[in-house]
Amino acid sequence: MEKFIPYEKLSKKKKRELNTRKRKTWGNVNPVTRRPENPKAYNRQKARKWSDDSSFVPLNLYMHSRHRECSCNGYAA
């Protein structure tokens, strides 16, 4: 049987061994705290994606131009 030595008086090597034996794993659980994104906060990435979209055409402009081209509804263009 080993003689009892208080933790404070153990050598660094022995303390390290004791700590590794006591330490448990988290398994599949990630201990990082996660919070949902604040919907009211300004998101630069979202704003950038919207402005970079070159295929964006306002709907009213698109419909107005199509209305002028179409002669099927009896209006003169």
Image (cartoon, rainbow, N blue to C red):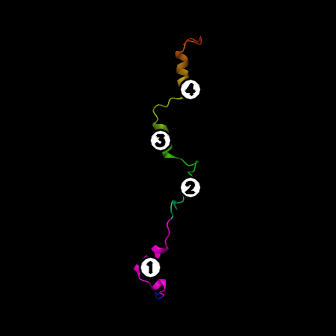
- The mark nearer the N terminus, 1 or 4, is 1
What is the count of numbered marks? 4
- The residue labelled by disc 3 is 48
- The residue labelled by disc 4 is 60
Q: Main secondary structure of the magenta part?
A: helix
Q: Position of residue 39 (x, y in %)?
A: 58, 48
Q: Nearer the viewer, mark 1 or mark 4?
A: 1
- The residue labelled by disc 1 is 15
The amino acid marked with disc number 4 is Asn
Residue 9 position (above or below residue 66): below
- The residue labelled by disc 2 is 35
Question: Is 1 colored magenta in this rendering?
Answer: no
Residue 23 position (above or below residue 58): below
User: What residue is drawn where x is 52% and y is 46%?
Assistant: 43
Question: Quadrant of the image for the C terminus?
Answer: top right
Disc 4/disc 3 C-alpha distance (Å): 23 Å
Q: Position of residue 40 (x, y in %)?
A: 58, 48
Disc 1/disc 4 C-alpha distance (Å): 73 Å
**What is the magenta range?**
4-25
Q: Left or right: where does residue 13 sit relative to residue 50? A: left
The amino acid marked with disc number 1 is Lys
The amino acid marked with disc number 2 is Arg
Residue 4 position (above or below residue 54): below
User: What residue is drawn where x is 55% and y is 18%?
Assistant: 67
Q: Left or right: where does residue 37 sit relative to residue 5? A: right
